[in-house]
């Protein structure tokens, strides 16, 4: 795993087709279809949601987990300890400067820990997978501190499996199409703002 600062996150996202920068639209505004759920604040079924998110994101060659609000690092979780991860990686920059966790398939256990922590706390974060084969449709996720989980896809049926998983867990997934405002405001969630 490699840690990225804000500029490095922006460069990576532009290079991989997400274009996530302050001066560009948020990635879900460019998706074809999205589905959103809201986890309950009390006892969220974070393990089940994290497992469904992992399935929804599929396989990848690289995964950028972009934490848009680094204050979440102050919440130590058993599932993922940022300070230990930084130490293991030999990272010398301050944790509050490091918005991105760039993972490879070999980092799948770390990815699962991060995903579970993001659902537990919850984090403001994007999960942006990249594929060496550019024909693979893009599918990405966004979590917010108030328990919203959104999966967006570049193809019309790209979120159906996640929606079905959420129904099995008792959620009512809300679908959106390109141009919809969506069920929650994005104010204050601009990366690096």
Image (tube, rainbow, N blue to C red):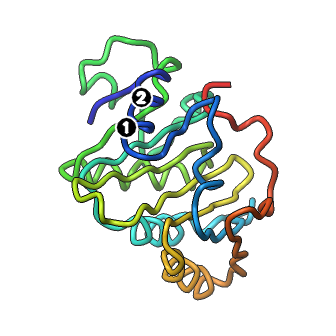
- Which residue is painted at 39% across and 26% down in the image? 4
Considering depth in this image, is 16 or 115 the residue closer to the camera? 16
| Left or right relative to 40: residue 49 | left
Marks 2 and 1: CB-CB under 8 Å?
yes
Q: Is residue 91 above or below residue 38?
A: above
Image mark for residue 73:
none
Q: Quadrant of the C terminus?
A: top right
- Which residue is painted at 45% across and 13% down in the image? 94
- On the image, the x and y values in percent for residue 115 come to 45, 53
| Left or right relative to 126: residue 132 | left
Quarter-wise, where is residue 182 in the image? bottom right
Q: Is residue 175 above or below residue 153?
A: below
Q: At numbered mark 2, what does the secondary structure look like: helix, strand or loop?
A: helix
- On the image, the x and y values in percent for residue 16 come to 37, 44
Considering depth in this image, is 71 or 163 the residue closer to the camera? 163
Pointer 1 residue: 15
Callout count? 2
Pointer 2 residue: 11
- On the image, the x and y values in percent for residue 67 come to 53, 37
């Amino acid at each position: 795993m490699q840690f990225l600062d804000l500029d490095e996150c922006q460069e990576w996202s532009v290079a991989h087709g997400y274009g996530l920068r302050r001066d560009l639209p948020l990635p879900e505004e460019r998706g074809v279809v999205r589905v959103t759920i809201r986890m309950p604040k009390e006892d969220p079924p974070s393990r089940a949601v994290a497992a469904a998110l992992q399935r929804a994101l599929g396989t990848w060659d690289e995964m950028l987990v972009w934490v848009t609000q680094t204050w979440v690092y102050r919440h130590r979780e058993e599932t993922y300890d940022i300070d230990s991860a930084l130490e293991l990686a030999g990272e010398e920059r301050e944790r509050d400067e490091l918005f991105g966790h760039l993972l490879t398939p070999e980092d799948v256990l770390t990815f699962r820990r991060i995903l579970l922590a993001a659902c537990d706390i919850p984090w403001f974060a994007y999960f942006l997978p990249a594929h060496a084969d550019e024909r693979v449709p893009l599918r990405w996720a966004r979590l917010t501190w108030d328990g919203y989980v959104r999966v967006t896809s570049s193809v019309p049926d790209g979120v159906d499996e996640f929606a079905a998983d959420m129904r099995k867990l008792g959620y009512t997934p809300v679908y959106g199409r390109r141009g919809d405002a969506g069920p929650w405001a994005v104010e204050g969630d601009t990366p690096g703002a």
